[in-house]
Amino acid sequence: MSRIHSLGGYFHEYQKSVQNPEAFWASVADNFYWRKKWDKVLEWNFEEPKAEWFINGKLNITENIFERQLFTHGDRTAIIWEPNDPNEPAEHISYRELYERVCQFANVLQAKGIAKGDRVMIYLPMIPEAAVAMLACARIGAIHSVVFAGFSATALADRIKDCQAKAVLTSDGNYRGNKTIEVKSVVDEALSMSDGSVETVIVCQRTKQAISMTAGRDHWWHELCQGASIEHKAEEMDSEDMLFILYTSGSTGKPKGVVHTTGGYMIYTYYSFKNVFQYNPGDVYWCTADVGWITGHSYIVYGPLLAGATTLMFEGVPTYPHPGRFWEVIDKHQVNQFYTAPTAIRALQAFGLEPLQDYKLSSLKTLGSVGEPINEEAWRWYHDHVGKDRCPVVDTWWQTETGGILISPLSGITPTKPTYATLPLPGIQPVIVDAEGNELKGNSVEGNLCIKFPWPSMLRTTYGDHERCRQTYFATYKGYYFTGDGVKRDEDGYYRILGRVDDVINVSGHRMGTAEVENAINEHPLVIESAVVGFPHEIKGQGIYAYVICEDLEKTQRTEEVLKKEIIDTVSKIIGPIAKPDKVLLVSGLPKTRSGKIMRRILRKVAEGDVSSLGDISTLLNPEVVEEIKTKAGIPA
Ligand code: WT7
């Protein structure tokens, strides 16, 4: 159903999807169980903006994962869970077992007074309960908001406050490589900073480390489940009811809550999963992302489970206990589709071929890449040495806001080209515009990537601030959704993503706003001003380079090294370790225009170590600081 089998079939479906999008998506939606069918497929305009799909359709997404499929494959494995430590046994959870766990936990949530429309924060490591928690929320109509368990207490508190979460689902701790990480204590700290919206905390036992439990508020997951029924009637949801909020960084301000709704997200994640990965029943599919990111939502949990797939969830890290861990897991569970990020590929590439030698990797059929542009060297290494020259690489371009993959090869169908995301999926109408918003038609053009027609899993709003959604995505180029990415369409009509054109840095496939990192740095009491830019980093894709103006060092009674470390620790504390600057340069001034705007272009050039084309700096307010910055950055005069 809805499955494309050939390149001709792809072009045919694409044509249909553009000529009559409503009929096209209705035929995909017909695969699902709707308690009440929709009255109209789509209403939209990009001015408000508004996009509504399957209007007045009623359904529950978990009923489509479970009830719809249990008769045919209740015994099929839904989740294979591979723990951090290879000596701990893996878990195989069938659709029926997962169904029972979800129903039981749905009952637990409702017994705690959590109801349709309430926001529930999920701050959990990569354990099956993370998926159970998401699905149980969806079952009762509560809106989940998963926060990556590596984010700091401050970051978690900001998100709890923004959506006024009523409950937090978490664990005692988290195993990651050779470390045991605090989780519950971070939640405690976050709650001490929030404003009291949270009434209930449910704690899943994972590490059994000592934690403190606040009476009346905190409960053990396993205790609440005892005696809770494994039967549950799913809440009826409107197609446009919110399914989840996921916070993501942008070029300005605090992270915003991207809102996805039920019906459109369901059919798009299902459709894109099946077609991009060419999943066949019985295959084992593994996406290495964390559930805290959109990739984990759409392509560990929802897409695969809606398609009746076996999805592998991995608790650990690529290099523990050895750099062959990924390959070991692939052989152990006979993984057929493997989906990871360029940063992981480059990190493993750095270990050479030896860690691969003990593994066959013969089960692999498809390799996927996501999160950032993949450089040609990494693409080839992945293709030649992991895929042994026989597995198509699907370079999938998409965003938290798009909900699902928009531009990507279909595995084994679309001819690939290293570093190219290739062609849009059916239903996706990309356009390239110049700085003035004029559409650049035809091939061999380069510009800003926009989408000109809605697709079912498009973001609906940013939580609590629709104007911000309009401003960020729909105001830059009138009539288009603007992605923030630069793109090239080559002579074959293939798309190659060139990276962000806004003040967003992509560190190891994780999105960081420069303003967000600067605000964190500025929290250090001795910092006067800072400016952050990205620079090319061999493993991470981009690293974070921070230029910081501080109080007079002599007065601070610290060495430069100590101060730099304090600044880095401040960022780690406020956002999380993933946002730590790779380089901190203490400077006496920042290059500014006469109107006071920081000239990031100059800072980027210096960070890249390439000052051959700084342009005219004589119009700056303070041209002399450029020399100082160059010298301090170690660039020869
Ligand atoms: C940004 C979105 C989509 C899930 C993971 C990241 C970059 C994503 C690719 C790709 C080149 C890519 C873009 C995009 N990006 N995939 N295949 N090739 N760049 O989600 O945090 O929302 O970030 O990641 O710059 O805008 P995200």
Image (spheres, rainbow, N blue to C red):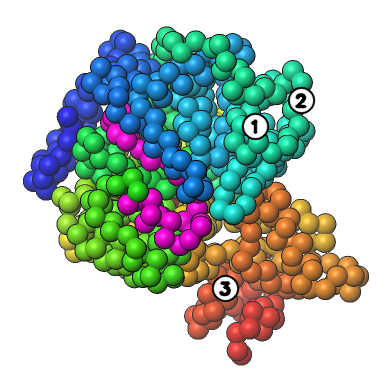
Residue 347 in view = yes
Q: Nearer the viewer, residue 637 or 542?
A: 542
State the residue position of label 3.
Answer: 607
Q: Which residue is mark 1?
A: 160
Position of residue 592 in the picture relative to residue 82 (left or right): right
Residue under circle 2? 214
Q: CA distance from mark 3 to mark 2?
A: 47 Å
Q: Image point 28% across, 56% down: which residue?
A: 361
Give the extent of the magenta segment.
304-331
Residue at 29% in and 41% down? 284
| Residue 313 counted in the magenta span | yes
Q: Amino acid at mark 2?
A: Thr
Q: Amino acid at mark 3?
A: Ala
Q: Nearer the viewer, residue 609 or 583?
A: 583
Of 33 and 180, the residue lying toward us: 180
Q: What crowding class fits label 1: few (fewer than 14 Cα within 10 Å), some (14-19), or many (20 or more)?
A: many
